[in-house]
């Protein structure tokens, strides 16, 4: 998963294949679900959004070896993100509806954080901004997810011709992504900032090596 998040797709797939072989031989559904989650995130980082949808929906499909009723809670943000970017939100809506019903019965932090991220992406414009604000204020304990919400909010503001307002969440997202070294997401935030007219230096894995000892 770390390799996927940081854009090292070859390493992510090599490890996923090894884990899949181990999990399949033992019928370890939880491990197989985590493999699919990592593959979905790897595809999402590479901007292969339809592939990400295909990988992640397996975790939500009863009868699939990767289906897992608990671990699917951890994938909902990634699935909705991929579906939104692939133009396939109708694929995600029934899955989100199932998990919204489940959320009424459990205090699972991962599920509630994922749903807070997903709701504004699924909302109509009149409701979206308040849901973006709620997700960012409530997901403080989930810095990567919060930053992704800030990125999505900035993208939404840009789509609504609010370039200046978009810069604040985009800058915050970029700062967190840089700190976490999740470079695919850092680059997205930078692209969005450039589109608002702001220039910003590209982050690379070697950037920290340019710092002086002081």
Image: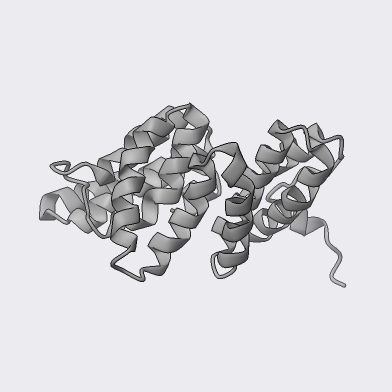
* Residue 134 or residue 54, whichever sits in front: 134
Is residue 185 visible to the viewer in this orientation of the structure? no
* Vertical comparison of 116 with 16: above or below: below
Q: Position of residue 179 (x, y in %)?
A: 68, 61
Question: Where residue 153 sits: x, y (%)?
Answer: 65, 46
Q: Is residue 70 left or right of residue 138?
A: left
Q: How many marks overall?
A: 0
Q: Quadrant of residue 134?
A: bottom right
Residue lying at 34% horizontally and 61% vertically, measured from the top left: 103
Is residue 35 at least partly visible in the picture? yes
Asked whether 159 or 142 is in front, the reply is 159
Q: Return the x and y of residue 156 as percentages of the image width and height.
A: 66, 39
Residue occupying the point 77% across, 58% down: 209
Which quadrant would residue 212 be assigned to in this image?
Answer: bottom right
User: Which residue is more in the foreground, 97 or 6?
Assistant: 97
Residue 25 falls left or right of residue 193: left
Which of the two residues, 147 or 132, is positioned nearer the viewer here?
A: 132
């Amino acid at each position: 998963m770390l390799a996927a998040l940081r854009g090292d797709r070859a390493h992510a797939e090599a490890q996923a294949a090894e884990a899949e072989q181990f999990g399949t031989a033992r019928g370890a559904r939880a491990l197989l679900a985590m493999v699919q989650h990592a593959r979905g995130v790897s595809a999402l980082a590479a901007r292969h959004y339809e592939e990400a949808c295909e990988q992640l929906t397996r975790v939500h499909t009863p009868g699939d070896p990767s289906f897992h009723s608990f671990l699917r809670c951890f994938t909902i943000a990634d699935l909705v993100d991929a579906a939104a970017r692939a133009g396939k939100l109708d694929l995600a809506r029934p899955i989100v509806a199932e998990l919204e019903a489940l959320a009424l019965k459990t205090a699972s932090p991962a599920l509630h954080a994922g749903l807070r991220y997903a709701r504004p992406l699924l909302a109509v414009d009149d409701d979206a901004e308040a849901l973006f604000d709620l997700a960012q204020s409530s997901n403080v304990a989930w810095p990567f997810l919060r930053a992704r919400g800030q990125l999505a909010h900035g993208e939404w503001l840009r789509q609504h011709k609010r370039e200046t307002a978009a810069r604040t969440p985009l800058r915050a997202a970029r700062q967190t992504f840089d700190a976490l070294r999740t470079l695919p997401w850092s680059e997205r935030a930078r692209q969005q900032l450039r589109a608002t007219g702001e220039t910003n230096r590209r982050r690379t894995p070697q950037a920290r090596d340019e710092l002086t000892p002081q």
